[in-house]
Amino acid sequence: MQNEHTCTNGRQYLTQTAPPFDANGNCPIGAEERQAMVQALEQKFAEIMDILRIDRSDPNSADTPRRLARMWVEELFRGRYEPMPRCTLFPNRHKTSGIVMSRGIEVRSVCSHHWQPIIGECIIGYVPDRHIIGLSKLNRIVEWFSRRGQVQEELTEQIAQFLWERLRPRALGVILACRHYCMILRGVESDEEQAIMVTSAWRGELAEDPHWRDEFFRLAGLELPDHARIAAPRV
Ligand SMILES: [Zn+2]
């Protein structure tokens, strides 16, 4: 996580510096550089509209290149250019030994493949060891990883690994259930209500012990058929 990255030099920059420049990597940059990035993008989006033969003097389209540039840098890919959120921990003074769970954490992301929305929900549950974490931090961590080009499977693992390394709980589980609009608007044109992708990541005792996972699903309000309980894979 270097702060001296200068992302505005485009291709030349990518070939001269080290990762992480995957779509879901992180390269924090300052406000000035972000502004330069918006200006460079605005020009490119104007070119794209010309190629698509969209008249930019149309009042509805006149400001579209600027809107698009700001939207990608300041909103949809925002997390990519911001430093990681502070991860405030508190001592587990009362030796909480059950699952601490947060449900209904909103996921608003964009798929790396088509740059179309991924919208859904995240559930995070952990069994504390020495520390507990402020609940709002879980939302911030999910948001930070979501606001960039993502692949849901990798997003799930990124959230789990980030918490596993910093919180160091006895057990950790992360479930994401999301709609991918690249599957709804285009391609197979899935039904919006039906097309939900579910992914999970397990660490520690939740990865090893099916009874903990049963408890996780019960608290999460997720139905799990009996045969799935018995056959729940070790991850
Ligand atoms: Zn996609």
Image (tube, rainbow, N blue to C red):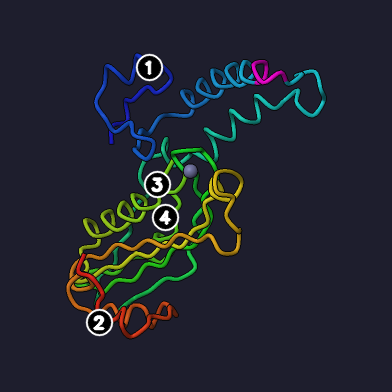
Labels 4 & 2 near each other (Cβ < 8 A): no
51 within the magenta span: yes
Query: Is residue 28 rendered magenta in the image?
Result: no
**Pick the front one: 225 or 122:** 225
* Mark 1 burial class by Cα count in 10 Å: few <14, some 14-19, many 20+: few
Q: Residue furthest front?
A: 188
**What whole-number distance in Å separates the C-alpha atoms at marks 4 and 2?**
30 Å
First reached walking from the N terminus: tag 1 or tag 3: 1
Name the kind of residue labelled 2 in the image. Ile
According to the picture, the residue beneath numbered tag 4 turns out to be 142
Give the residue at mark 1.
Answer: 11
Identify residue type, mark 3.
Answer: Val
Classed neighbour count for the residue bearing mark 3: other residues with Cα under 10 Å, few (<14), some (14–19), many (≥20): some
Ligand 1 within 8 Å of disc 4? The answer is no
Q: In the rendered image of this protein, does residue 109 appear above or below residue 234? A: above
Q: Secondary structure at mark 4?
A: helix
Is the CB–ligand 1 distance for label 1 below 8 Å?
no
> Does label 1 or label 4 sit earlier along the sequence?
1
Q: Which residue is mark 3?
A: 151
What is the spatial separation of the Cα atoms under label 1 and label 2, in whole angstroms? Answer: 50 Å
> What span is in magenta?
49-53
Q: Which one is in front in this view, the residue at disc 4 or the one at disc 3? A: 3
